[in-house]
Image (spheres, helix red, strand yellow):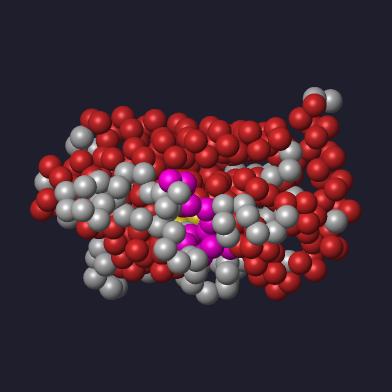
């Protein structure tokens, strides 16, 4: 048995032993745990002591499975955008209920640079899914039902675009229409992934998994910076496209959903003509979100629910309720 397998067996045994204790703190399907997570992350890890929080917080497999749900979403979106097809069936199985996908279609890229970037990110996200599934082994959750479609005005992308004011209420937003709609759709996800992995960092107890999560965080930060840079550059080159204003509106919509406050920033700075490619707090640090607040964004609601938006029947795993 490999060392990683032994570590995972220990984690799973610990998870079983602490199940009853965790259930108490996860009252109402996750609200209690969300409050604990919010306390831990309130000041970039300050507040509660790490030991006491971790004793009642989520296990490493629960955290990695939550991340796997997000990676399923990103990988599926990029796969459709670049190839016109979703993930292979071999990457969809696992614990919980395997769902179906409301599909997208391939983008007809006009800018070769955007096409190259899209292909690169698609490859990275596919590798994230494969890596997390391998690390979790039999504990890996199945890919849940996903909505990455483009035809329904009540679909996830359309509702997100309507909330940000990119399209009028009741109308369709096609994230696969062209380079610009693709970039805006990618912007919805990438910043959220960065804050999710940053928020999970204080909760991961095994150093091997913490290092792996840090590696994925770095990759997601590169992706987010790339998307923000291209949007800003295209917005400056062609102001009529309104890309800077649209990206800033998406940021504001995320801020309105996550119940945290001002932890999101657009791609332009306060000074006219300045950029804001790297969104940071007053200490020059990236923002954190705990898992319930991440779910608020991908469920497209500020309410405490267990499904919605890009996950029509919710994510798989124990960490499934928004705040």
Observer able to see residue 145: no
Name the residue located 70 percent from the left edge and 69 percent from the top edge. 32
Q: Residue 56, how many percent across, how many down?
A: 78, 59
Between 141 and 239, which is closer to the camera in this rendering? 239
Q: Residue 182: x, y in percent?
A: 30, 47
Q: Residue furthest top?
A: 2
Tell me what residue is drawn at x 45 percent, y 49 percent.
Answer: 283
Left or right, 10 with reference to 78: right
Residue 226 in sight: yes
> Residue at position x 41%, y 49% from top?
280
Q: Quadrant of residue 168?
A: bottom left
Query: Quarter of the image containing the C terminus?
Result: bottom right
Give the residue drawn at x 57%, y 52%: 44
| Residue farthest along the front direction in this orientation | 283
Location of residue 11 in the rendering, given as x and y in whole percent from the top left corner: 81, 43
Check residue 290 for magenta coloring: yes
- Out of 254 and 319, give the one closest to the viewer: 254
In this rendered view, identify the residue nearer to me: 320 or 55.
Answer: 55
Range shown magenta: 284-299
Q: Judge whether residue 83 is colored magenta.
A: no
Position in image of residue 10 (x %, y %): 85, 40
Query: Does 197 appear above or below 159?
Result: above
The number of numbered discs placed on residues in the rendered structure image is 0
Q: Quadrant of the N terminus?
A: top right
């Amino acid at each position: 048995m490999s060392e990683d397998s032994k570590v995972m067996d220990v984690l799973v045994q610990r998870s079983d032993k602490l199940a009853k204790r965790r259930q108490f703190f996860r009252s109402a399907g996750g609200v209690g745990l969300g409050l604990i997570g919010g306390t831990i992350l309130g000041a970039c890890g300050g507040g509660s002591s790490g030991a006491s929080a971790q004793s009642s917080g989520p296990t490493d497999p629960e955290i990695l499975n939550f991340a796997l749900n997000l990676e399923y979403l990103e990988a599926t979106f990029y796969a459709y955008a670049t190839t016109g097809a979703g993930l292979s069936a071999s990457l969809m199985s696992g614990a919980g209920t395997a769902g179906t996908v409301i599909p997208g279609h391939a983008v007809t890229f006009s800018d070769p640079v955007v096409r190259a970037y899209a292909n690169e990110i698609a490859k990275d996200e596919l590798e994230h899914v494969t890596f997390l599934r391998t690390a979790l082994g039999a504990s890996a959750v199945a890919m849940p039902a996903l909505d990455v479609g483009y035809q329904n005005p009540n679909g996830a992308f359309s509702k997100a675009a309507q909330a940000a004011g990119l399209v009028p209420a009741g109308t369709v937003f096609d994230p696969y229409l062209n380079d610009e709609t693709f970039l805006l759709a990618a912007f919805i996800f990438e910043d959220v992934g960065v804050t999710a992995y940053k928020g999970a960092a204080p909760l991961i107890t095994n150093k091997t998994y913490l290092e792996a999560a840090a590696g994925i965080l770095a990759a997601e930060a590169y992706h987010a910076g790339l998307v923000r840079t291209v949007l800003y550059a295209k917005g400056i080159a062609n102001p009529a496209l309104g890309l800077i204003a649209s990206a800033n509106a998406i940021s504001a919509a995320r801020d309105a959903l996550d119940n945290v406050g001002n932890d999101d920033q657009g791609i332009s700075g306060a000074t006219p003509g300045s950029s804001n490619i790297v969104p940071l707090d007053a200490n020059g640090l990236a923002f954190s979100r705990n898992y319930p607040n991440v779910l608020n964004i991908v469920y497209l609601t500020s309410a405490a629910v267990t499904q919605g938006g890009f996950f029509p029947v919710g994510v798989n795993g124990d960490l499934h309720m928004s705040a």
